[in-house]
Image (cartoon, rainbow, N blue to C red):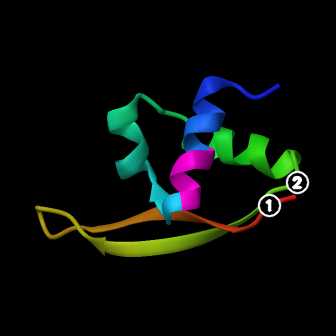
Amino acid sequence: MMYPQTVEVLEMLRKGPVSNKDAYPKGIYRLGARVYDLRKMGFDIKTVNRTGRNKRNRKVSWASYVLVSSP
């Protein structure tokens, strides 16, 4: 059984890379937990660590997830 948010994350991953910035507007606040659930089901999901600057020019980092293969 998949939670509705897990299904939503899987659909997003099938379209391309997903980060928290993409998931928050859809009400998914624990993206890492949903990715963990998908990995337990056999999906191969790669984590890409990214860095950049925010509006105050401070260094920030975040994770982006990419679906590599399905079970």
37 on left or right of 27: right
Question: What residue does disc 1 label?
Answer: 70
Task: Using the image as rendered, state which of residue 63 and residue 65 is in the foreground.
Answer: 65
Amino acid found under the numbered disc labelled 1? Ser
How many angstroms separate mark 2 from mark 1 (CA)?
Answer: 7 Å
Query: Which is nearer the N-term, disc 2 or disc 1?
Result: 2
Q: In the picture, residue 2 is in which quadrant?
A: top right
Q: Relative to 24, is 35 above or below?
A: below
The magenta-colored residue range is 10-14
Residue visible at 38% across and 38% down in the picture: 24
Question: What residue does disc 2 label?
Answer: 42
Residue 65, image x, y percentages: 57, 62
Residue visible at 20% across and 64% down in the picture: 54
Instruction: Identify the residue at the far left of this view.
Output: 56
Residue 68, image x, y percentages: 71, 71
Residue visible at 88% across and 54% down in the picture: 42
Instruction: Tell me, for residue 27, which label it has, or none.
Output: none
Amino acid found under the numbered disc labelled 2? Gly
Q: How many residues crowd mark 1 within 10 Å: few (<14), some (14–19), many (20+)?
A: few
- Image quadrant for the C terminus? bottom right
Q: Main secondary structure of the magenta part?
A: helix
Question: In the structure shown, which secondary structural element does the residue marked by tag 2 occupy?
Answer: loop
Q: Relative to 30, is 56 above or below?
A: below
Residue 31, image x, y percentages: 56, 42
CB under 8 Å between callouts 2 and 1? yes
Question: In the structure shown, which secondary structural element does the residue marked by tag 1 occupy?
Answer: loop
Q: Relative to 21, is 24 above or below?
A: above
